[in-house]
Amino acid sequence: MDNSSPQVRIWQVVSLVPAGAVVTYGQVARMAGLPQHARMVGSVLRQLPRGTNIPWHRVINSQGRISFPAGSAQYQRQQALLLEEGIEFIGDRVPLRRFQWQGGFEN
DNA sequence: CCCGTGACGCCAC
DNA sequence: AGTGGCGCCACGG
């Protein structure tokens, strides 16, 4: 159903994640048809232009943690966005049991 | 073209 | 719970 480049498929998957939910890098990779390529997801998100409408902040690592140095400006920015959407943190991590998006249908 | 780096993930200690 | 090693691979120097 989709022959586009890995980069485009990653954008599409992340765009589907609803506010109030999160997904992991590895999960995005699998949903984009790129198993074992979690790292590429981070690489692609890193290149996103500023002001993009793609909800990049809803992507966190498999441990439920934000993949930026603790306390960095980027870390704080991402956490603020998640908190605004109702995501809860237990210490420095999001309990995936409750907030991880299960991809509704496609994937 | 080789090599280090890194928004990752998994597994072994 | 931390640390370390490895697989993967796009990028930049």
Image (tube, coloured by chain):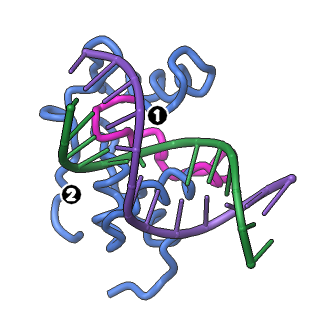
Chain colours: A blue, B green, C purple
Residue at 29 percent across and 18 percent down: it is A89
Q: Chain of mark 2?
A: A
Q: CA distance from mark 2 to mark 1?
A: 21 Å
Identify the disc placed on residue A38: none
Task: Give whichever of A82, A70 is nearer the camera.
Answer: A70
Q: Chain of mark 1?
A: A
**Dot 1, crowdedness within 10 Å: few (<14), some or many (≥20)?**
some
- Tell me the number on the disc at residue A103: 2
Describe residue A75's horizontal placement relative to residue A28 as left or right: right
> Residue A11: horizontal and vertical position, in percent?
48, 63
> In the image, residue A41 lies at what x, y percent?
47, 57
Which type of secondary structure does the marked residue at label 2 adopt? loop
Does the magenta portion include A63? yes
Query: How crowded is the residue under tag 2: few (<14 C-alpha within 10 Å), some, or many (20+)?
Result: some
Question: A66 or C10: nearer the eye?
Answer: C10
Magenta residues, dominant SS class: loop
**Among the two numbered marks 2 and 1 on one chain, the one whose residue lies closer to the N terminus:** 1
Amino acid beneath label 2: Gly
Residue range in magenta is A46-65
* Residue A46 on image: x %, y %: 60, 49
Q: Which residue matches tag 1?
A: A67
Q: Which one is nearer the viewer's eye here, C3 or A80?
A: C3
Is A62 above or below relative to A48?
above
